[in-house]
Image (spheres, rainbow, N blue to C red):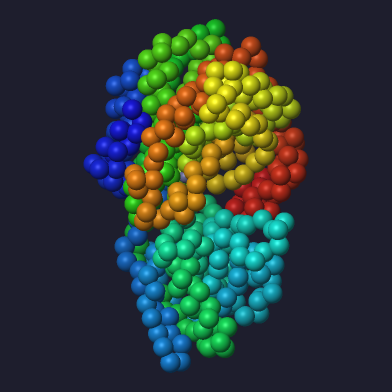
Amino acid sequence: MGHPWLVWSAEHIGHRLTGTTHGAKAEVLADSLFRASGLAAVHYAPFRARAWQRDSVGLLLSAADSSFRPACVALAHSPVLASVRGGLLDVGNGLPEDLARSKEHIRGRIVLVNLGLVGAPKEASNLHRSEKTALAIEAGAAAVLFVNNVEGHVLLTGTASVNGDLISIPAACISSEDGALVRRWLAGGKEVVGALNMANESEVVTARNIVAEIQGSDLADEVVLVGGHLDCWDLATGATDNGLGSFSILDMARCLKNCDIKPRRTIRFVLFMGEEQGLLGSKALVEQYRASGELDRIRCMVNMDMTGHPQGFGVMGPSGWKEQIELINTGIRTVDSASFAGRTTTGAWLHSDHQPFMLAGVPVINPHSDLGSHVYGCYHSSCDDIHLVDPQAMLDNVRFVGMLLTALADADTLPAHFTDMALRDRLIQEGLEEKLRIGGDWRW
Ligand SMILES: [Zn+2]
């Protein structure tokens, strides 16, 4: 039922941006579907968050003999009102070494930055747009103009704030084609001046995560949590980011409940709001669990963000977790070796709802997916609509992640959480210290 529910939502609710009436309708829909499926302990977990909405944006780029108005979109958490005029400066990929090269020239300029990595050495690791913006602000830029790396006049939105607060300068995105044109001007020695004006709305609102359970039996106090974000950006209907994950979770809850399984541990289903505006819902839930003393009972967290056709699972946990996941992958392959490769990997990454759990020491698991470049090219863009969703991808989510959840819930024992020092060492080993520092999330 995940796919028909998602089709209905796309047609009747549209986008699901946190803090808007659309977002509130999506919260009610998810709550109703959990209830209709007969889940236990269905409830809202509200949190306060600074919501952000675009109003208008305009960009004029002028050189000595020509000017044009490229299509552009504002990035979230840009100021409520901004009017900036300044010379354009190309800082390439916008990594610390790129900014260091142009250090004396950045102040007061509109910096042109690639969203992706272009021409970087193979070992270079990209930064999130919010991290690049934080570095540009620190260097004194007047505005950030991101150049999308997807061809076809596609514009990308997303947050430019590392912590969910408004940023001090405007940030916007232009297409790869318009970016290339400006760069031809700059390469020809022209001085290019940009005038960027925007109006946005921002207010503190109450948003709601939606929670439901299948209660456990002899180990009911221990929780296996599966979560994914229900909210999405407003340029389209967020069908793949993250209708795929969130509506698959709704259907997984329905199926497991219908199968009348009696898991040993409690399986908890969470749909987060506020992910796109800075992991606001998952951060709030982890803080609520910490305050209530429940965090220790969350044995692991499975995150479904743009998940489809899982081919295995990646895990970030202390010793024992890799073996645990290997065992489960092997078990799933005894049921279906034709459509499930059963790959096990270890590793850590940031910027989805698993992050607050991971930083609290909770082992996190991510299904491996490859949705194809036609889907990834529409990430955060106006083309992320229902035509991109393969119903089979959602069925496979329910089948394979459903089996993962029941196996985790029924295991005799599960390996431990990270200790604080082991987590610190592991994050360093995974190369995440610098990124977490830029985001203000490094506590050691
Ligand atoms: Zn997402």
Q: From the viewer's perspective, is 134 left or right of 272?
A: right
Q: Residue at x 68, y 53 (%)?
A: 434
Q: Determine which quarter of the picture holds residue 152.
A: bottom left
Q: Residue at x 69, y 74 (%)?
A: 101
Asked whether residue 347 appears in the rendered view, the answer is: yes
Q: Position of residue 317 (x, y in %)?
A: 67, 31
Please identify the residue farthest to the left as the structure is shown: 12
Please identify the residue farthest to the bottom as the structure is shown: 65
Q: Residue at x 31, y 62 (%)?
A: 55
Counting every numbered tag in the picture gives 0
Q: Position of residue 18 (x, y in %)?
A: 37, 46
Q: Position of residue 93 (x, y in %)?
A: 61, 66
Q: Position of residue 82 (x, y in %)?
A: 40, 71
Q: Quadrant of the N terminus?
A: top left
Q: From the viewer's perspective, is 65 left or right of 354?
A: left
Please identify the residue farthest to the top as the structure is shown: 218
Q: Residue at x 70, y 58 (%)?
A: 122
Which residue occupies the foreground of this view, 1 or 271? 1
Q: From the viewer's perspective, is 403 left or right of 433?
A: left
